[in-house]
Image (cartoon, grey):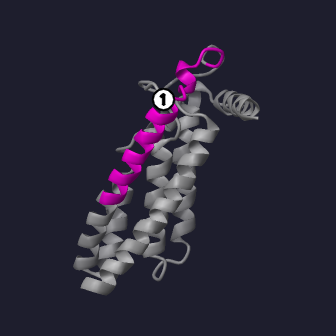
Amino acid sequence: MIDTLINHDEELFLFLNNLGSPTWDNLWLLITNKFTFIPLYALLLFLIYKKMGLKTMLFSVLVIALMITFTDQITNLFKHGFKRLRPCRQEGVMEYMRFIAERCGPYGFFSGHSSNSMAAAVFSGLLLRPYFKKLIFILLFWSAIVAYSRIYVGVHYPLDIFCGMVFGAFSGFIFYKLIQYLQAKYL
């Protein structure tokens, strides 16, 4: 059963990855770059500051730093625990794919980009929900685009992305609950 799931995952990866074309490569490389969205993060912190005040914004920075550290470390535990090769390192896959990423690490299950972007989307969307009802949907869409970029550039399978997004959503919700607790106790 696991072999069948992995075969389907590889087939879906090859299908999605090969939808790309050189015309769009630079856009997807920009999207997958972790520094591209610094202005978005700055805007979200500004909105938290404007709507909730300096203390909540400072608590948010602390909680976000903890959340990203948490998701990164758990992601690395999974990658080194499962040791599933990335598509760009997997014989039988790498010969048929488009690889446009700058580098290819050894293991890919599950995606850190997907978990981090989803955690940030859920956390920020829930925190700002009283003021911007539809913002969470925009952030979830943004997170899905970032996640897909990892397939496009050739460094993650769809299952890596899906599991990363699920873990990120869970993490974002848990850390949202943490900031709610901190707000109730200290603000």
* Residue type, numbered disc 1: Tyr
The residue pinned by badge 1 equals 107
Tell me where residue 91 appears, x and y as whole percent.
Answer: 61, 14
- Where's residue 116, x and y in %? 43, 51
Q: Dot 1 lies on which element?
A: loop
Front-lying residue, 35 or 187: 187
Q: Does residue 156 show up magenta in the picture?
A: no
Determine the image quadrant of residue 88. Answer: top right
Query: From the viewer's perspective, is residue 171 above or below residue 129?
Result: above
Give the quarter of the image for residue 30: top left
* Numbered circles on residues, count: 1
Look at the image and give the residue range highlighted in magenta: 66-93
Q: Residues within 10 Å of mark 1 (few under 14, many from 20)?
A: many
Magenta span contains residue 76: yes
- The N terminus sits in image quarter: top right
Q: Nearer the viewer, residue 119 or 139?
A: 119
Q: Residue at horizontal 57%, vertical 66%?
A: 137
Figure quadrant of residue 185: bottom left
Q: Position of residue 56 (x, y in %)?
A: 28, 77
* Percent x, y of residue 49: 29, 75
Asked if 107 appears above or below 64 in the picture, the reply is above
Q: Residue at x 53, y 37 (%)?
A: 109
On the picture, is 93 further left or further right than 138? right
Task: Check the image and report above or below for 187 versus 7.
Answer: below
Q: Is residue 48 above or below residue 61?
A: below
Q: Quadrant of the C terminus?
A: bottom left
Q: Main secondary structure of the magenta part?
A: helix
For the residue pair 80 and 135, the one nearer the viewer reads as 80
